[in-house]
Amino acid sequence: MPGLALALTESPFPYAALALASYLRVPLSFDADKSLEHTDASGAKATGLDAVLDALVKGTNVAGASTKSASFIDIARALATPSTPFPEITKAIDTVDDHLAFRTLLAGHELSVADFAVWGAIKSSSKALGVLKSGQHPHLSRWISYIDGLASTVDALAQLTDAKYNKARSSTTSASFALGLPGAVHGKVVTRFPPEPSGYLHIGHAKAAMLNYFFGKEMYGGKFIVRFDDTNPTKERDEFEQTILEDLEMLGIRGDVITHTSDWFEKLYEYAVEIIKRGKAYCDDTEQVDMRAQRMDGIASKRRDASIEENLARFAEMTKGTTEGKRWCLRAKISVDDPNKAMRDPVIYRCNDMPHHRTGDKWKVYPIYDFACPIVDALEGVTHALRTNEYRDRNPQYQWMLDALGLRKVEVWDFSRLNFVFTLLSKRKLHWFVDQNLVRGWDDPRFPTVRGVRRRGMTVEAIKQYMLLQGPSQSTVALEWDSIWAINKKVIDPIAPRLWAIAKDKAVKVTITNGPKSETKTLPLHKKNPDVGTKQTLFSSTIFVEQEDALSFEDNEEITLMDWGNAFVRKKSVDASGVVTALEMELFLEGDFKKTKKKITWLAQTDFAPVRLLDYDYLITKKSLEENDSLGDFVTPTTEFVVDALTDANVTALKKGDIMQFERKGYYIYDGERDGARDFICIPDGRAASIASKWVTSGATAPSAQKLAGQSWGKGAAASKKTTAGATTGAPAVAENQFAAATTKMYKVDSVYSTETPPKADTKMYEVKSVYAE
């Protein structure tokens, strides 16, 4: 297949070939070990940097090695050779810097192979980069910045970074997957995913479901069961079952069979009676608080040595749901003082007279998960029980249940639970946010449920890629959100339509003195992907731009109006408070957009379509809550931020759930129309600013200083005072302070448009001037 293959481990790395191939749109591939090799359309191969560079430019409009550029090719070879003495490196860099004093490029007015060769050599040479740190080569630094900034170079380096990242991640993940499941036989492996129908599927469940499905179906060609663990009628609802199945279907996960633990209630009851008869379980009426203390201290219950007959009689009372029966629970008789506290006589059956959503009021006693799960696994033919390692202490208990009842062995294989910073995955705590009206439901874009992140703009493909990258790792860490959102960006960027929007209260009217009468042109929705479609763009002598852009303009500065051309800023009207009230521009369409510093989005005067741009913050202010933390102390005061904006009629073609980009603002997902305006939810792209906490910039008081009044969680939470974090009290404050640097607990994010010239950076790299410096 035609293309360029690069070895990730090659030293010095052939940056010249990488950048040149990307500039010529030659397909790139990366291999851990294979050496540099170019294959052309005829199948001819070239190896070695010089031969590859010649092969790449053959038959193109990029100038190859010539008499004029030969000396620079020699310089590139010297710079890239590790054994070249330091004085020679310095001399070579001085020569190139002097040459570029009055030139843009090395050989002529167009990019040549010499430019890529020298740039790549410097990039791969620590000695050359060290010389440049002195700041004594301004012309060379300017030229390097130019090559660095080429779209093709940026893309090439991004592909290289991704390849290195995927290699590092896949080396661990692949090795873990390669280990396989113990005792697995192809075609005979049976795995299961057993969610409790007491809430919506969250991002952590997605990992468990995908790994069970991957091993059971894709790796071993076996069977995959979706089983609802419906043993607690107090929490469970049909609604949750249906949404879980829909979410699994959306993720491309389908069970060969769908079962319920309640399908086995009769059999589980028989096993409970059997385990009593074998003297391996007893009924206990110790108060819950006392039982917890006794288990912690290794103290035996006074009921532990009751006879089998007494226990059967008491269990019968439990089964009837009598007043006497409700005093008791059934405990496995394993150990009193095992170092593993999970083995200290756990409860395996308890009374509950609330009707079950499937079996009605037939049962008054229900099995505990730790009793039901291993038994149903054995009965349904599960060969490998894959579950998170938070259950690791219970693995011996799992096997004890099977051994006590003489059931066949099931392999238990665990992996790390998926945890994210500033994120709660506990259903109990998520329920609290719903009950307190701090979110609008289980699909709220602030929630880590599958529906919540999907509504925020996360694609199914990104979820799949991320989960498989995580693999069956054993390390439990709190992950940042940047990686999964960065993967999502790569999925949506090539297909997201491009539109423009301007903040409603920050729109500045621009009169174009030589502008046209109103006319509409058909333009591509995505410049790099014509398959996305077209849009209708209005051109007029009156347009609007953002206040931030207007503030940055210099008198008579040449700027670029995107999708139109260049223009000179001839007049800027500013009021006493420093706000730009109006602009006059003169079109200069023959100008070179490559030479302007500012590329500006704009909207022509028309019947604007009102939209709301919504952004969200984390629900809690602490990266990871400790066991004794009170949830109410760490609730983020303001978590929704709204900006009213204007756009054009192209948004009317969007359907709810469509993903697009408002250029220079970010990616958005259309969330439907409300109160006469369309809502667009901002999609994080993985960069620091998009995942940093936002509430601090709104001027809100930290929760530690101002606890949310009356709020508690757990028992009694329903009676606490309700505070709506969804209220947009933070939005105006953000708008007033949008030029200030954001203070965050994750990253420091500076304002894009500073009103002051920033001080010179004390840096060890070459100086990079501000884009908007005077």
Image (spheres, rainbow, N blue to C red):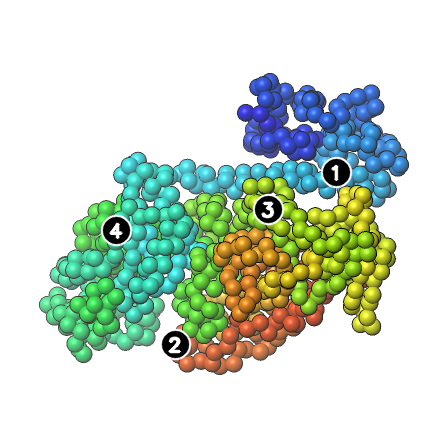
What residue would you read off at disc 2? 715
Kindly identify the amino acid type of the residue bearing the numbered disc 4.
Asp
Residue corresponding to mark 1: 147
Marker count (numbered):
4
Q: Is residue 81 visible?
A: no
Q: Is residue 249 left or right of residue 144?
A: left
Q: Residue at x 52, y 42 (%)?
A: 169
Disc 2 to disc 1: CB gap under 8 Å:
no
How crowded pointer 4 is (Cα within 10 Å; few <14, some 14-19, many 20+) is rated as many
Residue 76 position within the rendered picture, expressed as x and y whole percent measured from the top left = 77, 28
Q: Is residue 193 visible?
A: yes
Mark whose residue sits in front, 4 or 1: 1
Query: Spatial distance from mark 4 to mark 1, Cα to Cα?
Result: 60 Å
Q: Which residue is mark 4?
A: 377
| The C terminus lies in quadrant | bottom right
Residue at the disc numbered 3: 534
Q: Position of residue 353 (x, y in %)?
A: 22, 73
| Cα distance between the residues tagged 4 and 3 | 54 Å
Q: CA distance from mark 2 to mark 4?
A: 33 Å
Above or below, 706 relative to 584: below
Between 768 and 567, the one lying in front of the other is 567
